Image (cartoon, rainbow, N blue to C red):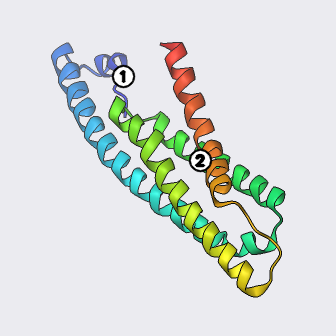
Amino acid sequence: MHINPYTLKEKGWSAKEIDHAAGIVEKHKKKWDQAAYWVLLIVTIVGNFLLSTALLPMMLLMNDLSFLALIGVLGIILGVLITGVIKGMDLHFHHHTAILFIVPLIAFISFFFITGTANLIALQTNIAYYHNPGIVGLVYIVAYLLPYIQFLITRHLTK
């Protein structure tokens, strides 16, 4: 929420009342941003795990190049969604560090193990498609981080 001091002044508010109201709104906005950040972080981690698990059948049906392209597109889409939510938040450096390192690390581990599981299933069922778990995880996290890194660079250059 944004306080427009000109509108409030037209309605008869004093400068002291406007400053007081703006202070209250700003205080609560920071608390809301903190709570929303942690919920977003948890949802992102769980969502990445669910995505990697849901893609297991696709790993068994798609060749390497097609699957990596799919992972890249999904990573960019989720990265854009998360970045869109984060843009409106007032975050500190340690929040960005968690988003840049913790989430991708957990996503990489998740994709690594799920891809390994898909490879074991493929081996046991004579399915010809095998995917390198490290490359799958790396392609996903690079694609996932691209929109966020672009946001950070743009924000830094405009300051």
Quick check: 79 left or right of 102?
right
For disc 1, the neighbor class at 10 Å (few under 14, some 14 to 19, many from 20) is few
Q: Nearer the viewer, residue 156 or 124?
A: 124
Residue displayed at 39% across by 42% down: 98
Q: Quadrant of residue 66?
A: bottom right
Using the image, tell me which numbered label, if any, was put on residue 19. none
Residue under numbered circle 2: 141
Which residue lies at the image location 78% right of the left edge and 53% below the top edge? 69
Q: As rendered, which of 88 and 57 lies closer to the eye?
A: 57
Instruction: Say what amino acid the circle numbered 2 marks.
Output: Ile
Numbered marks: total: 2
List x then y, in percent, for residue 62: 81, 68
| Mark 1 vs 2, N-terminal side | 1
Q: Please identify the quarter of the rendering in which residue 17 is found.
A: top left
Left or right: residue 99 versus residue 72 is left
Q: Position of residue 138 (x, y in %)?
A: 63, 49
Q: Nearer the viewer, residue 14 or 38?
A: 38
Residue 97 % position (x, y): 40, 36
- Element at label 2: helix
Query: In this figure, which residue is indicated by the disc labeled 1?
Result: 4
In the figure, 146 relative to 75: above or below? above
The answer to whether mark 1 and mark 2 are in CB contact below 8 A is no
Closer to the camera: disc 1 or disc 2? Answer: 2
Vertical order, 30 against 67 (above or below):
above
Task: Say what amino acid the circle numbered 1 marks.
Answer: Asn
Q: What secondary structure is found at the residue carrying circle 1?
A: loop
Q: Residue at x 25, y 25 (%)?
A: 22
